[in-house]
Amino acid sequence: MREDHGTHVLQRPLNGLARAWTLPASLLVFLLIWSGVSRWSGLPAFMLPSPGNVWDRFLRAWQDGSLIYHTGVTLTEVASGLFIGMIIATVLGYLLAKSPTIEQILSPYIVASQAVPTIAIAPLLIIWFGPGRLSKVLISALIVFFPILINTVLGVRSVSDDLYDLMDSLRATPYQVFSKLEFPAALPVMLGGLKVGATLSVIGAVVGEFVGSDEGLGFLINVGRGLYDTALVFVAVFALIALALMLYGAVILIEKSMLKWQTD
């Protein structure tokens, strides 16, 4: 018994160390494969640049300020769209969960809005609201709306009827039912939808920038594609990945902070 317990204790640091090295090791393997393919495939640099070429292009874009500016533009659009989409989806999702009548009226329109690809709606929004940042924010909000809405509805409806009966027996007000029961109970599911929305919001902003824009990482990708500057395209794509990871990580931190009571 003692030997098994000791073995189990010794394995914990090793498992933690292995997890810590997983990401750097996988990145190293990816870079080695990429470097080998770019070197031995015989493809020209404008088709498949090497990691070194992409790094040099990153340094140039960073030093001239273009990468910082366009990344800031896309981040502003993404964060604004995510916030607006989250607020509208959360409020409407709560109303749908609480009112079958509202759900019956609005559900066909909500489902229909998701049946149309965002790339098809983006030109209309740009025509209506102009090629500025507002149209990109609206496209981003539109694409994050549905997953957050669905998770909000599922979260609110997951509350047990017994808990509602308990709140009734305590003569809780509607606000107390919402703040003390519905919101905490639905929060884990809602945050799950927000994780999905955090990554989708980047896609929404970039789609809008592809369709029509003179700034942002999507615009930078279009410039690189037009000039056959494939290294610049790689730089912009990696910047988009970094934005998505940053937003996803921010949601995880919010989740750990707001759901701390689950582990206490």
Image (spheres, helix red, strand yellow):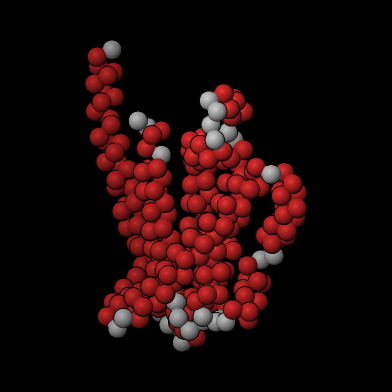
Please state, as top left, top right, bottom left or bottom right, where the N terminus lies in the image: top left
Give the residue drawn at x 48%, y 60%.
83
The picture places residue 171, in percent across and down from the top left corner, at 55, 28
Which one is in front, 165 or 192?
Answer: 165
Whether residue 257 is visible here, answered yes or no, is yes
Which one is in front, 205 or 54?
Answer: 205
Left or right: 66 in relation to 113: left
Query: Residue 173, located in which quarter of the rendered image?
Result: top right
Which one is in front, 26 or 35?
Answer: 26
The picture places residue 88, in percent across and down from the top left corner, at 57, 57
Give the residue drawn at x 29%, y 24%.
8
* Residue 78 vertical position relative to residue 192 in the rendered view, above or below: below
Give the residue drawn at x 46%, y 87%.
227
Give the residue drawn at x 34%, y 62%.
32
The picture places residue 235, in percent across and down from the top left corner, at 39, 73
Which one is in front, 255 or 240?
Answer: 255
Left or right: 49 in relation to 91: left
The picture places residue 45, in percent across and down from the top left corner, at 41, 79
Whether residue 57 is visible here, answered yes or no, is no
* Residue 247 vertical position relative to residue 160 in the rendered view, above or below: below
